Image (tube, grey):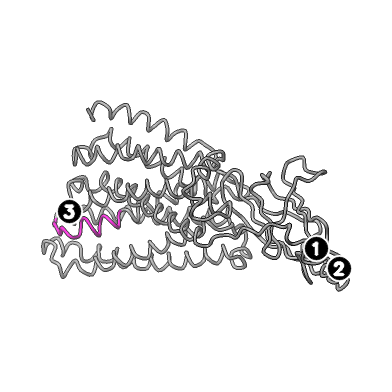
Amino acid sequence: MTSRLLPRLLTALTALAVVLLTAPAASAHTELESSSPKAGSRLTRTPTTVRLVFSEPVDLADVHVTADDRQLPVARAVHGDSKGNVVEVAVPKAAVQSRLTLSWHVLDMEDGHATSGTLSFPLAAKGKAKAQAAGAADSDDVPAAAQESEAVRTAWVATRWAGYLALALYVGGIAFLALLWPQGSQDRRTRRLLTLSWTAGLAASLLAPGLQGAYGTMGTFDDVLRPSTYTDLLNTEVGVVAACRVLLWVLAAVVLAALLQGGERAARSPGWRVGALAVGLGLLRTTGMTGHNAEGTHPGWGEVADLVHLLGVSLWLGGLMLLLLGVLPRRRPEELSATVSGYAVLAGVSVAAIVLAGAVLTWQVVGSFDALVDTGYGRLLLLKLAVLAAVLLIARRSRGWVRTRLDIAVLLRGDRATVRPFVYSVAAETGLVLVVLAATSLLVTSAPGR
């Protein structure tokens, strides 16, 4: 039955992947372009309203402005709002003292990411006296402000990290078996690792949209479980992409099931490889469509670079995990000779692609050297690059072992003492790559460096 359905599924998967690969990525974050009064202006009295102009159209329900821990009402601007990107914030005088500080939080209508910031206006002594004379009674009419939940954001970042890891293990593991180690499809550890990666990937793709929606609306964990959080998100482009990602993980189960049933025969089959390629590219593309790759003036380059970057990381990390947990524990001379040397070449190409694509993404998202060193996003990116440099040093040591010690290890039939240094090096390399993935999760959920 599986053999009859497989050609049709492969055709459907290929068509779906083509659609996803040619679809536009989500747009940049909604940012605050200007305000009236201008931020930092010294005011002689408390303004009745503050006008906020955003870079993109906004929904009033997605805009939250607070002052002194109280939610302020927002409304559409009466004039000068042809694009739907201007809102007016009503400021009660009782909400301020010597300085008016407005904290804004907006959810992007298309990519679902939340951005926030603060506006501060010092008040002259006369304005301060008038504000204090207004009395505390007016504050009873202002609702308490919703607060960003750091716990929800932490859970969102952790889920993104798990999703990236699952994606890398699944796509990289499938590619490792298809290109270098078809007989490994019969290995129990390898089969369990691929099954676990698929399970984690599907779970992360189901949970991440709820966490993102709850964080974007300044909700709590209770909101993650509410159907309305998901239905609201599905009305945005990021919700559609999330739904496509879930569908692709379901289709990935078909590819994995065919591999587990067919074993080495399936791994060598051209039909299975085409299906696995279509699903893998679809998963990579949908993962990158809600990131920062569309920032900057050349979003097309960012989209291509992001796909190459994710593919390189997946081939690198997925291969490392299968090498560490699948090939090396078996210590079979013929597998060591073919697989380790083949992976060394694959890893070298992957790392080169990662570095080149990463340079394009850095130029696209950050845009300048000042933004690289003066913004939180840029500093986190520098930390990621520092860890990546350490990984490359360890990888260089691993490649040195392949050049000088692999033949000896094969002659000694996988002697434990001979292979042990390479195992330690691969384990350290894998651990640091996981740290790089954690930094990537933080970068994706942070405001860009521009």
Residue 390 lies in what quarter of the image? bottom left
- Given residues 158 and 367, the one toward you in this image is 158
Position of the C terminus, as image quadrant, is bottom right
On the image, the x and y values in percent for residue 245 come to: 43, 41
- Crowd tier of the residue under label 1, counting other residues whose Cα lies within 10 Å: few below 14, some 14–19, many 20 or above: many
- Given residues 59 and 310, the one toward you in this image is 59
The furthest residue to the bottom: 125
Looking at the image, is mark 1 or mark 3 earlier in the sequence?
Answer: 1
Q: Distance between the residues labelled 1 and 2?
A: 8 Å
Q: Tag on residue 335? A: 3
Q: In this view, does 78 lie above or below 329?
A: above
> Could you tell me which secondary element the residue under label 3 belongs to?
helix
Q: Would you say the residues marked 1 and 2 are in contact, meaning their CB atoms lie under 8 Å apart?
A: yes
On the image, the x and y values in percent for residue 136 come to: 77, 66
Q: Distance between the residues labelled 1 and 3?
A: 75 Å
Looking at the image, is mark 1 or mark 2 earlier in the sequence?
Answer: 1
User: What secondary structure do most residues of the magenta stretch adopt?
Assistant: helix
| Span shown in magenta | 319-333
| Residue 284 painted magenta | no
- Crowd tier of the residue under label 2, counting other residues whose Cα lies within 10 Å: few below 14, some 14–19, many 20 or above: some
On the image, the x and y values in percent for residue 146 come to: 62, 58
Q: Is residue 296 left or right of residue 399?
A: right
The residue tagged 1 is 93
| Residue 331 painted magenta | yes
Q: Tag on residue 130? A: 2
> Could you tell me which secondary element the residue under label 2 belongs to?
helix
Q: How many marks?
A: 3
Position of the N terminus, as image quadrant, is top left
Q: Is residue 222 left or right of residue 403?
A: right
Q: Residue at x 22, y 37 (%)?
A: 266
Amino acid at dot 3: Glu
